[in-house]
Image: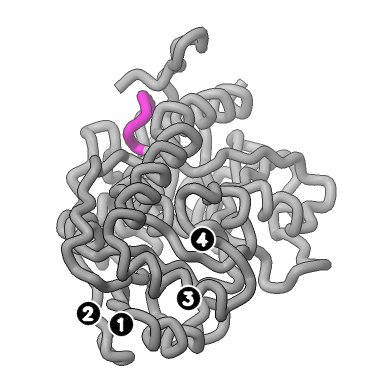
Amino acid sequence: MSAAGPGAPAAVHRRVLVWPVHGSYMTALVQGPHEYLLPLTPQRDADGSGRLGYPWPAGAREVPVERLRDEEFDVLILQRPRDVDLVEAWTGRRPGRDVPAIWLEHNAPGRPTGARHPAADHPGVLLVHVTHFNDLFWEAGGAPTRVIEHGIVDPGYRYTGELARAVVTINEARRRGRVTGTDLLPRFAAAAPCDLLGIDAEALGGIGDIPYEELHDVMGRRRVYLHPVRWTSLGLSLLEAMHVGMPVVALATTEVADAVPAEAGVVGTDVERLVAALGRLVADREEARERGRSAREAVLARYGLRRFLDDWDRVIEDVAR
């Protein structure tokens, strides 16, 4: 796939060393025109998981870590503090000094103010945020920053809304608690049945972790997508639900208030109002369908894959030069 949009210059093919820390994010990134080198350890652990078993394009290539020292690459994408040490140990190169480097930050800071990003301690590294909210709240020191908003591989319109239920996707909802709004789920469930998806969801009576190739159909059969998260980055599952064509009921926190237009659902901080809205949308299939169509239209316009890849092409080329 060419990433060059109308009026944009064709992307230069680059070799990019990157860890697939977030499988859904990487699924979008590797659709670009570059070669993506994915470290592979014998254990296929978090430091070398390779392709994670995903059916990614051939440009996403596994490289055994013992061969990385002899592997040429143009740009490095860091995502965790330990990636800096791994790069030095496995390649002998210092990020930002011996190889052009980007630090891709997926998350909101642990606290609203005063959280200094680790990229600030690595001169020559460009800090890329996935939302403007994150760019606003992280303290970057002297590190230059950019924002590349999310892009999604469009799963297509999958919405049927045949089940008068809501669905919410949270990994490790029990452990993450108030951060992900887990404590709010009983209040929403009083208005409409809520199906919880994600890692360890079974511990709270949920469905569990659904294989990615089945996820969008499972979501689309439910009538409303619920997003009760208090403090996190803009979840890809929310954007995927909008792509599927689902209406949204969500807390107006972090980037959500800017990402979900009014016609796509109901967004706010008054939980009782949101509970009432969830009950109404689950009961009114036609309103839910119309709001879901608006959600899909909005998310394709702002979070489409082509714009995402164009943005990444520009940043990769700027850093590589």
User: Which SS class for mark 2?
Assistant: loop
Q: Closer to us: mark 4 or mark 3? A: 3
For label 1, the residue is 201
Q: Position of residue 92 (x, y in %)?
A: 53, 46
Measured Cα–Cα span from mark 1 to mark 2 = 6 Å
Q: Position of residue 183 (x, y in %)?
A: 50, 88
| Disc 2 residue type (three-letter) | Ile
**Res 207 label:** 2
For label 3, the residue is 276
Q: Is residue 46 above or below residue 184?
A: above
Measured Cα–Cα span from mark 4 to mark 2 = 25 Å
Helix, strand or loop: magenta stretch: loop
Q: Residue at x 59, y 36 (%)?
A: 99
| Disc 4 residue type (three-letter) | Val
- Residue in the foreground of this view, choosing between 132 and 261: 261
Q: Residue at x 39, y 50 (%)?
A: 291
Measured Cα–Cα span from mark 4 to mark 1 = 25 Å
For label 4, the residue is 266
Q: Where, quadrant-wise, is the C terminus in this rendering?
A: top right
Residue 21 seen in render: no
Q: Which contiguous range is marked in magenta?
A: 30-34
Residue 278 seen in render: yes
Sequence-wise, the earlier of marks 1 and 3 is 1
